[in-house]
Amino acid sequence: MSAAVLSVPPVRPGLFPPPSVPLLFADGDRYEWTHTGDVWTRTAGSWVPSSQDDPRDDGTGAWTDAEVRASLGRAVESWDVRHRFVPVVQHRPLPGLPVRTAGDLEHLELPGPIRSVAQYLRDQRAGRFLPVRDLVARYDEDAAYDFAPTVSLPDMVAVLATILAERVRPQVTHDERAGRLYARYDVEPEGGMPVGYRRAAEGLHVFVLSAIPAEA
């Protein structure tokens, strides 16, 4: 699994279903039906129905976490590419408790039952999280089909340990209430930092703990 930040011009959407069903949710998460334009945004623990790019409640009633989890599960199992789960992009500071060393990663107290972990990266152009496999498809759709939608807990720990050891100004946090880990770091441009350049581009990952893995 790559910890690289992928940022290239977008291609057609809807190539893959959601990578997994999250074990937990956070306010600001979105559940999208691309075939109808319907969107549910989690607000104060409930999923508020709205429309694309408009988070206001449209008055048709709310969904529960259990209902969203069940609907996402059906989409994962039936390879329904019309459904999307979009984790909320958290701004500074990252939520949760800091994880400073690889040793800290080995002693995380994680909720269960955890079957897998889905990694999302923030797309630099869209400003929102996308599954890693969808970003791989921007380079090579055929290769993306061979790319695992989720990874194991040891694989997640290995990627986060690499980020802590090798990235510039890394920050890793564990948000226990949302069932996810975040990683942020600076990405220096090729050739080094130009004179007068004050801040590098930023890489941002979220690892969403999952109860149900997608089909490989």
Image (cartoon, rainbow, N blue to C red):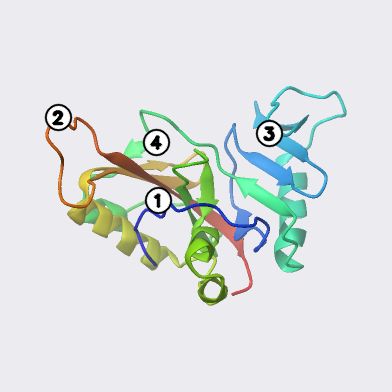
Q: Which residue is mark 4?
A: 96
Q: Earlier in the sequence, mark 1 or mark 3?
A: 3
Say the numbered circle drawn on residue 109: 1
Q: Nearer the viewer, mark 2 or mark 1?
A: 2
Query: Counting other residues with Cα less than 10 Å from the Cα at mark 3, is it few (<14), some (14-19), or many (20 or more)?
Result: many
Quarter location, residue 72:
bottom right
Q: Nearer the viewer, mark 3 or mark 2?
A: 2
Query: Counting other residues with Cα less than 10 Å from the Cα at mark 2, is it few (<14), some (14-19), or many (20 or more)?
Result: few
Disc 1 marks a residue whose amino acid type is Glu
Compute the Cα span from label 1 to label 3. Answer: 28 Å
Give the residue displayed 71% in from the left and 50% down from the top: 69
Identify the image quadrant of the N terminus: bottom left
In this rendered view, identify the residue nearer to me: 149 or 137.
137
Q: Residue furthest left?
A: 195
Say the numbered circle drawn on residue 41: 3
Where residue 149 sits: x, y (%)? 54, 66
Q: Which residue is mark 2?
A: 196
Disc 2 marks a residue whose amino acid type is Gly
Disc 4 marks a residue whose amino acid type is Gly
Compute the Cα span from label 3 to label 4. Answer: 21 Å
Q: Earlier in the sequence, mark 2 or mark 1?
A: 1
Query: Counting other residues with Cα less than 10 Å from the Cα at mark 4, is it few (<14), some (14-19), or many (20 or more)?
Result: some
Q: Earlier in the sequence, mark 4 or mark 2?
A: 4
Callouts 3 and 4 close, C-beta under 8 Å: no
- 76 up-or-down from 145: above or below: above
Q: Earlier in the sequence, mark 3 or mark 4?
A: 3
Where residue 78 sits: x, y (%)? 77, 67
Callouts 3 and 2 close, C-beta under 8 Å: no
Q: Nearer the viewer, mark 4 or mark 2?
A: 2
Q: Nearer the viewer, mark 3 or mark 4?
A: 3
Disc 3 marks a residue whose amino acid type is Thr
Compute the Cα span from label 4 to label 2. Answer: 33 Å
